[in-house]
Structure formats: C-alpha cells, structure tokens
Image (cartoon, grey):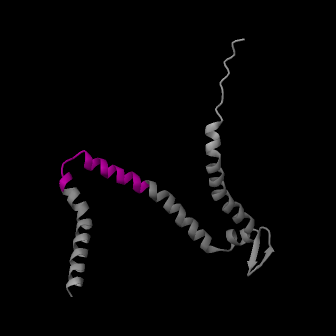
Amino acid sequence: MGKNIRKIKVEPYLYIIPSVVIILFIYLFPIVKTVMNSFYRKGGAVAVYVGLQNYYYTFFKDSLFWISLSNNLKLLLGVPILTFFSLLIASLLYQQIVGWKLFRIVLLIPYILSITVIGIVFDYIVVA
C-alpha cells in the first residue's frame, strides 16, 4: 500500500552498548553508593542507619557547608564573567585598535619576566 517503512540499523548500536554500559557504571555507581551511604553513620566497620539526620546536620548545623556553597556559587558566577572579559580583551587585541602593541606588551611582560628570572636563577644554581 505504499507505506515507506524505514529499516532501523541495529549493528551500530550493538557496537556502542559496551561503552555506554561502562560509562553508566562509572558515573552512576558512585552516585548511587554515595546516596545510600548518606543515610548511615559509619564508625569503623559498623554502619548505623540514621535516616535524614546527616542531611539535617548538614543544612542546619554545619556552617562549613554554607561557606563552601557560597564559594561554589562565586566560582559558578566568576568563571563565565572572567571568560567573557578574556574573550573581549582577546577580540580587541585581534582588531588592532589604537595602542594594541603597548597593551600586548604590558599584558605579556609578567610571563616573559618570570621565564627569564627562572632561567637566571637556575643558571646561578648550576654554576654555584
């Protein structure tokens, strides 16, 4: 009756299945194990089930958790902002605006000097 039935090729998926299973095991097993362990208090070889008590302590009584959460939020916001400004400066240097050679020199001096200073210091170490 004129139906256009596409034939699904199974062979490529058979080649991919072992790597997908390995990757899922590598990523999912630690996550599942961590969630399971979070409901227990471990003391040596003995694990005692405490339910949500660990989460209660973490969210309401542990100040280090909130400090680390704040640091991670700063990092989460800081990296894209710094990347944006780095790309902006790189594009300005690429467009060769007025004073671009001076700006490039000022920007690269710390890298050049550090390599030179390290070379001189190691030269004195070898001679002495």
- Residue at position x 23%, y 66% from top? 112
Measured from the top left, where is residue 86 in percent x and y?
35, 54
Q: Which residues are magenta?
A: 81-101
- Could you tell me what secondary structure mostly forms the magenta stretch? helix
Task: Indicate left or right for 40 with 6 as reference.
Answer: right
Q: Nearer the viewer, residue 128 or 34?
A: 128
- Residue at position x 24%, y 61% from top? 108
- Residue at position x 67%, y 62% from top? 30
Q: Verify whether residue 108 appears in magenta.
A: no
Is the N terminus in the top left, top right, bottom left or bottom right quadrant?
top right
Q: Nearer the viewer, residue 56 or 123?
A: 123
The part of the image, by quadrant, that contains residue 42 is: bottom right
Measured from the top left, where is residue 90 in percent x and y?
31, 51
Is the C terminus in the top left, top right, bottom left or bottom right quadrant?
bottom left
- Residue at position x 23%, y 65% from top? 109
Q: Nearer the viewer, residue 25 or 8?
A: 8
- Residue furthest toward the top? 1
The part of the image, by quadrant, that contains residue 55 is: bottom right
In the rendered view, would you say 33 is above or below 121?
above
In the rendered view, would you say 9 is above or below 1?
below
- Residue furthest toward the bottom? 128
Measured from the top left, where is residue 123 in percent x and y?
21, 79
Task: Indicate left or right for 78 with 48 as reference.
Answer: left
Task: Indicate left or right for 24 with 127 as reference.
Answer: right
Q: How many marks?
A: 0
In the rendered view, would you say 107 is above or below 88?
below
Task: Indicate left or right for 47 with 122 as reference.
Answer: right
